[in-house]
Amino acid sequence: MWARIGLVLFVVVVAIVAQRLGLYTELANPAALPAKIAALGALGYLAFVVTYALVQPFGPPGTLFVVVASLVWPWPIAFTLSMLGTMGASVVGFSFARFVARDFVEKRIPARFRKYDEALEKRGFVTVAIMRLVFWMPPLLHAFFGVSKVRFWTHFWGSFVGYLIPLFVMSYFGPKALGFIKDLPPAAWAAVVATLLFVVLVTLGIRKMRARRESLATRPDSARTPT
């Protein structure tokens, strides 16, 4: 509850500050925003990293920040800022779960993360690096590491190694991929959407079949009657 209240207050404060600074008028010309942000120099760097680190652990996808960075700055700067922001968000999410709201967070960790508890205890660094490479940076993963037995610095450096490849790919190829997607014809968009829907349906079907199979495997055999 306190986390949600804090997030709401943060959003309200940001909205008020944005209004006072006249930032809403800038939204009338969104195409010019990247150039204006880049023109801020070091102040823009700081604002991006701090916003990323404080906001992402509580909801917004980190991919959004990384894509924005790749559109505003050249890829070496975008990569560096994305890494700083991603590591900051990981530390904030980890620390919040471990030191502030451990009991609240622990009840909300998905089962798909819980199966890595033993691996984290035995091979912390490698497990963190692989999980960051595969799952990347969802807020619940930050929280899971926070309530696990992995040490802070093991989590820190394991996350850093796991983030290297995804962040480089997003920073370097992000604008090119967006340009390619933007130029797709309507028929191609329809094919992409249809493919995504198909993948989602297949995934849901497999999960449903697995859940049913597990339910049948754990159900007592009530059909048998003693003879």
Image (spheres, rainbow, N blue to C red):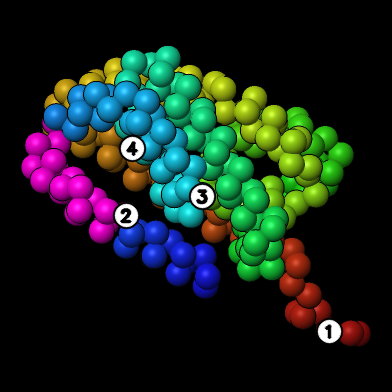
Which secondary structure lies at badge 3? helix
Q: Which residue is mark 1?
A: 225
Q: Relative to residue 99, is residue 82 depicted above or below?
A: above
Which secondary structure lies at badge 2? helix
Mark before the other along the chain sequence, 4 or 2: 2
Q: Which residue is mark 4?
A: 195
Q: Position of residue 208 (x, y in %)?
A: 54, 58
Q: Which residue is mark 2?
A: 14
Please name which of the two marks, 3 or 1, marks the residue nearer to the observer. Answer: 3
Magenta stretch mostly in which secondary structure? helix
Q: Name the mark on residue 57.
A: 3
Q: Position of residue 85 (x, y in %)?
A: 49, 35
Give me the residue at 34% from left, 15% from top.
Answer: 74
Task: Give the crowd class for mark 1: few <14, some 14-19, many >=20 residues within 10 Å.
Answer: few
213 sits left or right of 1 in the view: right
Mark before the other along the chain sequence, 2 or 3: 2
Q: CA distance from mark 2 to mark 3?
A: 17 Å
Residue type of the residue flagged with mark 1: Thr
Please name which of the two marks, 4 or 2, marks the residue nearer to the observer. Answer: 2
Give me the residue at 57% from left, 22% from top.
Answer: 164
Mark before the other along the chain sequence, 2 or 1: 2
Q: Hey, which quadrant is residue 12 in on the image?
A: bottom left
Q: CA distance from mark 4 to mark 2?
A: 38 Å
Q: Hey, which quadrant is residue 150 in on the image?
A: top right
Check contact, mark 4 vs mark 2: CB within 8 A.
Answer: no
Please name which of the two marks, 2 or 3, marks the residue nearer to the observer. Answer: 2
Q: Which residues are magenta?
A: 14-31
